[in-house]
Every structure is written in C-alpha cells, then in structure tokens.
C-alpha cells in the first residue's frame, strides 16, 4: 500500500466536522476517529452517532480507534455503522481473536492497538487474524502530546516480525506525529501515520498532509 496518512479529527473543530474532513479529503487516505469512553482513558470524545453522521457527510474511509473498555461488546457496531477500519486496544479486549474475526465478518479491517508499555511479542501469532497493528507513540487519551521515542525500538521489532512472517499487516503509529517526528517513525518501519494537531492546527491542513507524506516516504525503508 505504501505510506498512508490518517488525520485525526480529535484536533479538528467538532462544530465544523464536515468541512474539516473536506479540507483533507483530496490528499489523506483515511479519517482517524478517536473514540474515548472516560474509562479506558481519562477523556470522553465521541461515539457511534458521530460515526454515522460522518459516514453520511463524507466518502472518506473511516479509521476508528476505540479507546474504550469492553470493545468485545461495542466494536462491531462501529463496523456495522460503516467504518472501514476498526481498531480495539488489546489491553481492553477479553477475546481479541474472536473480536477481530467478528470485525472482519462485518466487512471491516481489524486493527489491534498497543499502549506504549505493551509488548508486541506475545501477540506475534495473532497477526494472521489482523489487518493492522497500531503502536501508540503517546499514552492514549489526549491529542497534542509529545512523541515517545522509547516506542521506536518496538516499531522496529514489529516491522521485523512482519517481515519474518511475510505479513502484509499495516503498521500504524499514533501520537505526536508531526514534521519533526514522522521521519523517525517511518525509518523504524511504520507505514500508516495518524496526525491530529499537526494537521488540524496547520494553516493549510491539506498541505500539511502532503508534507507529512513526503517526509515519511523519504525516510521509509519499505
Ligand atoms: C490519542 C489519540 C490520537 C490523537 C493524536 O490518544 O489516539 O489519535 O488524536 O493527536 P496528536 O497527533 O495531536 O498527538
Ligand atoms: Zn488515535
């Protein structure tokens, strides 16, 4: 697939969501939607009704990142609402294999997210069940945090794992991705980049998406 950019609307103006999404629709690959429940993370954002509205307002593919407890119960509804990709946190899932199969069964790509302190190695055998691994490069919960360089070795190890297993699973990074950090993440082997504040606080969000893509492509070993 090459390098993909998924701007996070967490940093957009929620009162203008349709036009904010429109501002990146010609240049971005996905729209990243951060669902937070004030339990799994100490913040509350948006949920299913917004996904349903976005689905109607835009033809951009939706990349739903569920930072919620009990994704086993709630995640499939996001796929049913039309999200093309649904990512749950492995720290919150009771039965990640069953959940990933259910998401795929509803026609969505199944993503599994890991917080910075969660190791990838115990989940190596789950790769065939998944379409994307999301490695958080901040502690989930808030936009605008600083990129955690301590995650870079895990990005490298995950890329090696995918290579060793001949896997085509996408490797997404999320948190603090900006012009000054994206090159490090790309060099380590990430291929899908979420960026919230970098994109939506830029004067020209579309131009920022293009700048991020160019920087990632220039540094990627893929
Ligand atoms: C954080 C969210 C991120 C966030 C990224 O918990 O999962 O998607 O919106 O925002 P920035 O790019 O500002 O770190
Ligand atoms: Zn996110």
Image: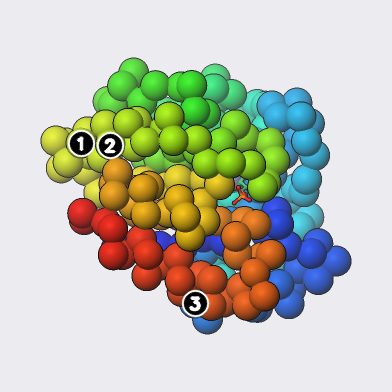
- Percent across and percent down for residue 165 are 16, 36
| Quadrant containing the C terminus in the rendered view | bottom left
- Percent across and percent down for residue 43 are 78, 36
Residue 214 picture quarter: bottom left
Q: Nearer the viewer, mark 2 or mark 1?
A: 2
Alpha carbon of mark 2 to alpha carbon of mark 3: how far?
27 Å
Secondary structure of residue under mark 1: helix
**Which residue is nearer to you in this view: 2 or 101?**
2
- Percent across and percent down for residue 109 are 44, 50
Secondary structure of residue under mark 2: helix
| Quadrant containing the N terminus in the rendered view | bottom left
* Label 3 Cα neighbours within 10 Å, binned few <14 / some 14-19 / many ≥20: some
Residue receiving disc 3 = 27
- Residue 17, can we see it? yes
Residue receiving disc 2 = 156
**Which residue is nearer to you in this view: 68 or 135?**
135
Q: Which mark is residue 160?
A: 1
- Residue 79, can we see it? no
Quick check: 148 above or below 65? Answer: above
Residue drawn at 29 percent across, 49 percent down: 187
């Amino acid at each position: 697939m090459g390098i993909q950019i998924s701007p996070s609307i967490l940093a957009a103006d929620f009162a203008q969501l349709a036009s904010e999404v429109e501002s990146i629709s010609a240049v971005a690959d996905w729209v990243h939607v951060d669902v937070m429940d004030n339990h799994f993370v100490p913040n509350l954002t948006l949920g299913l009704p917004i996904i349903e509205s976005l689905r109607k307002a835009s033809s951009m593919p939706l990349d739903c990142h569920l930072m919620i407890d009990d994704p086993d119960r709630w995640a499939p509804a996001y796929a049913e609402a039309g999200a093309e990709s649904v990512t749950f946190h492995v720290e919150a899932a009771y039965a990640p294999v069953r959940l990933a199969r259910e998401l795929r069964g509803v026609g969505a790509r199944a993503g599994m997210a890991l917080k910075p302190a969660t190791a990838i190695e115990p989940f190596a055998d789950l790769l065939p069940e998944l379409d994307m691994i999301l490695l958080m490069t901040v502690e989930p919960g808030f936009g605008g945090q600083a990129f955690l360089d301590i995650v870079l070795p895990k990005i490298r190890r995950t890329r090696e794992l995918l290579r060793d297993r001949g896997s085509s699973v996408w490797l997404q990074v999320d948190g603090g991705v900006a012009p000054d950090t994206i090159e490090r993440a790309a060099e380590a082997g990430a291929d899908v980049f979420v960026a919230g504040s970098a994109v939506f606080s830029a004067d020209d969000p579309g131009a920022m998406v293009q700048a991020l893509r160019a920087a990632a492509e220039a540094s990627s070993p893929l």
